[in-house]
Image: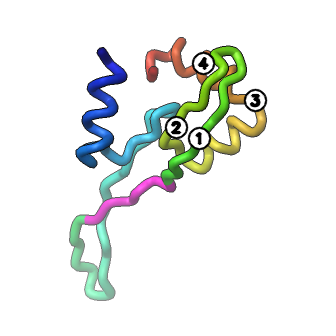
Amino acid sequence: MKSIKFAIHFIKGIMSRVCQISGKKAMVGNNVSHSNKKTKRRFNINLIKKKFYIPSENKWVTLKVTASTLKTIDKKGISEVLKLAKEKGLL
């Protein structure tokens, strides 16, 4: 049921800019002009949509991950990173 809801939101384009593995999301801050006026802005994360092959389940999975999480996946492996994310409650 959860995957069906995910697919519906994904197709509609409602997905937010949040990393699906680490849970990182955009920060809010200020643009500061030369005269020191402050206006709100967002510091977006560096999201990448990437397909991963999971050998234990013998299937491909598409995830939206940050560049830093991608480096972690390269270092530890997708299976280990998914296991840690499930322990933290992010998946």
Q: Which residue is mark 4?
A: 84
Q: Which of marks 2 and 3 precedes in the sequence?
A: 2
Residue type beneath disc 4: Leu
Give the percent coordinates (x, y) of residue 65: 52, 42
Question: On residue 62, which mark appears?
Answer: 2
Residues under numbered marks 4 and 3 in contact, where contact means CB atoms less than 8 Å apart: no
User: Pointer 2: residues within 10 angstroms few (<14), some, or many (20+)?
Assistant: few
Residue at 30% x, 82% y is 33
Tell me if residue 31 comes above or below residue 24 in the rendering. below
User: Pointer 3: residues within 10 angstroms few (<14), some, or many (20+)?
Assistant: few
Magenta segment includes 58: no
- Magenta span of residues: 41-46
Q: Which residue is mark 3?
A: 76
Q: Give the number of the mark in front: 1 or 4.
A: 1
The image quarter containing residue 44 is bottom left
Residue at 57% x, 45% y is 50
